[in-house]
Image (tube, rainbow, N blue to C red):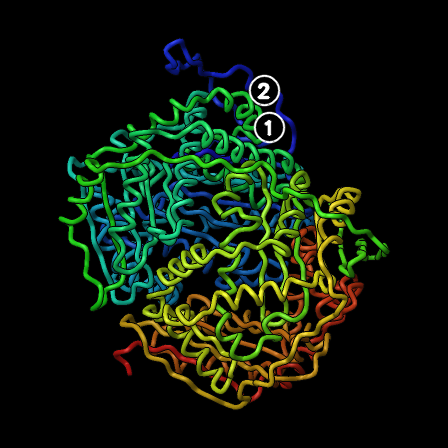
Amino acid sequence: MKKIVMNSIAALLFISAGNSIAQVDSKNEVKKLPSENIPTDPNVKIGKLENGLTYYIRNNGKPEDKVELRLAINAGSILENEDQQGLAHFVEHMNFNGTKNFEKNELVDYLQSIGVKFGADLNAYTGFDETVYILPIPSDNPETLEKGFQILEDWAHNALMTDKDIDEERGVVMEEYRLGLGPDKRMMTEYLPKLMYGSQYAERLPIGKQEVIENADYETVRNYYKDWYRPDLMAVVAVGDLDPEVMEQKIKDHFSKLIPVENARERKVFDLPNHDETFVAIASDKEAPFSQVRVYYKDLENAEDIVTTNDYRDQLVKNLFSTMINNRLDELRNSANPPFTYGFSSYGGTYARSKNAYQSFAMSGAGEQLKSLRALLEENERVKRYGFNSGELERAKKEYLAQLDRQFKDRDKQESGRIVGSYVSHYLSNSPIPGIEWISQFASANLPGIKLEEVNKLINDFLHEENRVIILTGPEKEDITQVKEEEVLAMLKDVENSEIEPYQETDIRENLITNAPKAGTITKVESNDKVGFKKLLLSNGATVVYKNTDFKNDEILFSAYSPGGTSLYSDEDYLNTGFANSGLAEAGIADLSLNDMSKMMSGKLVSVSPNIGSISEGFNGSSTPQDLETLFQMVHLYFTDLNKDEEAYNSFVTKQKNFLGNLLSNPNFYFQNELGKFRNEGNPRYLGFPTPEAFDSQDYDLAYEKYKERFSNAGDFTFYFVGNIDEAKLKEFASTYLASLPSSGKKEEYKVSAFREVNEYRKKVINKGTDPKSQVTILWNGETDYNQEEDFALGALGEVLTIKLVEKLREEEGGVYGVGARGNMSKIPYGSYNFSISFPCGPENVDKLTAAALAEVEKIKKEGPSEKDMAKIKESLLLNRKESIKQNRFWLNQLSAADREEKNINELLRFEEKVAALTAKEVKDVANTFLNEKYLLGILMPEEME
């Protein structure tokens, strides 16, 4: 797959993207001018050791004291022998189960001790063509830094792979294999041979074959490691808050010792052969939750690397094409009779590195795949016949430049974890990495010169009968007539010969607000210097809380809160509007439809979404500093001028029905729904799953009136802003657009429901599905007085128990791929606690693993956590807080939560003190207080075991 990588770069690159590299002659034909190679970002150092290993190094200070390490192996499942299918992935697992310098489980144990979580931080993945190991580590401690590079070296050539360790890991890999079983995999086995026709890719899914995972002999496993883990197929990437010279020396010290393999096996590149005919694959499954349509036009030629500036400009043209076709598909999605729930088209890579394709996708309603397919085909055909228009092109350019401008402005605020992947991609697939400064200059110089004719002619290269593949997947039900191949082929011809009207452009007014509201005033300003935020009291009673930060240069996050929500509805009104509330904003604002708003907002990075929850109403949103006034205007209009549009609402309902209509055929969704019903027996306000029938019972008129009621009193709202804020402008906008909103002067409180879930031991076994897959959920919850110290300890108990459950259920028993525990207390709407353990496993292991999990609970209740485990979770808590405290989202959530729950916001500053003071006894005590015999045991079992 060849792709453009646009990562943020710290230092300005003064390379002239200068003159446009294409021109239009008197006949309006585009002629290419001389081209040069795309430069490499000067902020990254690329080197190669004598043994052939490549390395990438870059200093990046965000987050502080952290470095992201990657070991990229240019080998994946595509290189497996016939008797090795699944062993590329198996070898990846084995690298976490014993190396020369870290015995089995010692590696994970050590990393946990420095705050690195297994799964969330430490991880790896195996693809068709690559295997990549992911290791973020603290960089402010020389010892941990040294061990981090030692781990990376051990993965490269020091895996032990003893017979015993291989056998013990088979169960864990099989549990991951089990997770992948289901309708998607069954349908994939039907369509993949046609999509990847004649290719090795159709025969080498990374998860592999069960018989190989369970029975492969030891040398066959080790041979994959010996053949493909070698320096000429490796890259080490190090990006983070560390001196580049230190990183480079570490790489040389650890990886120069890798010995090149003599007579090494050829690293083949596998092609995707062409085919003359159109392939149609139709697959259905009784458990498939969604109906989907895919159309692939695979290129006739192999993909070429993006090397020159002409290549890069060509990609810009393709990006503009994708934006414009998807804008049209979005308009269809928002139409009165939407042909699909969601649709998009794009040009890009396939499973095979060597082949690109133009691809169109739609999620349709059950039984409506042909309708969705026709819509995709007709939009492609419409572009082929008539092209796009100049207004569409200008909007696409604005959208592209707005996104690029945000990346450029935040080039010095990009996290290392977001940068490192671009260098991995450069190594694996030669994706260009010129840096955001060069990209920004190049785009500014060349976008204006891209003509409509260039974009329009792309469709002629994209669409062709050869190498075309149509894939339909969806549910198998008695009331659904399955599509036949001949129907699909007939439709292809019919669309080509049908009458299709040109796209009709509609005029949109320039201003969101046509009449400026009469501004209110700011009556009081308060400051909290300790936490660093200010509070504005407005003349209508509303409150604005804002915190100015420098975490991102081009980001402002926003939310708003008012107590009440649907808790103030009668039971009947709530049941008749609960699902409809989500569709109210689909009508748009101020006589502008969603499609109108999309066009008007071209080039603006701003979003606002109103919401009505169970105990509050409010908003969520974001903007750039330059688009902040637009955000305020949208908030004002959602209060005062939400459209009422039955047609738009019905379009929303249609899409929801199509999306949700068959969801309960999936065992996991069915399990959660049945468990929810079981837990809410006797709850008069339980909505349950949003079925098509439930949507039919909703009252749009009532929902709209209730919305106006909930948003009629702005004086009861608190508005929160966090980011790069110009305080003078924020105060101006708050006075103009918020203080001017209507207010009744009343302050509401939400109502607390009288319903409480039964607090006693219960067991609910739910049978669904044909695959040998089970899910276990153990849940403790109930009403209690809220206690901040207990809340903190209960969260810590979840962290500790997760560590112990992974050790027991995964590493010792080999019975799960993943397992987790989590706990917390809530203050609103009433004091309560919640603690859960959840894991998937084989049906035959449910009882054994459930007993093992509960035994770990009892062990902590009796003995408490070890000091070693307490040290692990404390280090993790501190490491996470060190990063999160530099994120706007963290502060937005904390400021609003402190007000909602009436907590002292200054307590945030005591976090390190609270972590240090947390004791094993406190964790043991909350385990004994809350994890008693009164729990719910929910079990999903296959149908055949009923």
Lateral position of residue 684 relative to residue 129, left or right = right
Residue 835, image quadrant: bottom right
Q: Nearer the viewer, residue 351 or 133?
A: 351
Q: Amino acid at mark 1?
A: Glu
Mark sitting on residue 117: none
Label 1, secondary structure: give it: helix
Quadrant in which the C terminus appears? bottom left
Classify 174 as above or below 193: below
Q: Amino acid at mark 2?
A: Ile
Quadrant in which the N terminus appears? top left
CA gap, disc 1 and disc 2: 9 Å
Q: Residue furthest top?
A: 26
Q: Residues within 10 Å of mark 2 (few under 14, many from 20)?
A: few
Q: Residue furthest left?
A: 486
Q: Nearer the viewer, residue 431 or 509?
A: 509
Residue at 40% of width from left, 32% of height from top?
321
Q: Nearer the viewer, residue 931 or 729?
A: 729
Mark sitting on residue 15: 2
Q: Are marks 1 and 2 in contact (CB under 8 Å)?
A: yes
Residue 289, image quadrant: bottom left
Mark yes or no: residue 535 visible: no
Residue 885, image quadrant: bottom right
Q: Earlier in the sequence, mark 1 or mark 2?
A: 2
Where residue 171 appears, as percent x and y from the top left, is: 36, 68
Mark yes or no: residue 891 visible: yes
Residue at 38% of width from left, 46% of height from top?
332
Where residue 575 appears, as percent x and y from the top left, is: 49, 75
Mark sitting on residue 437: 1
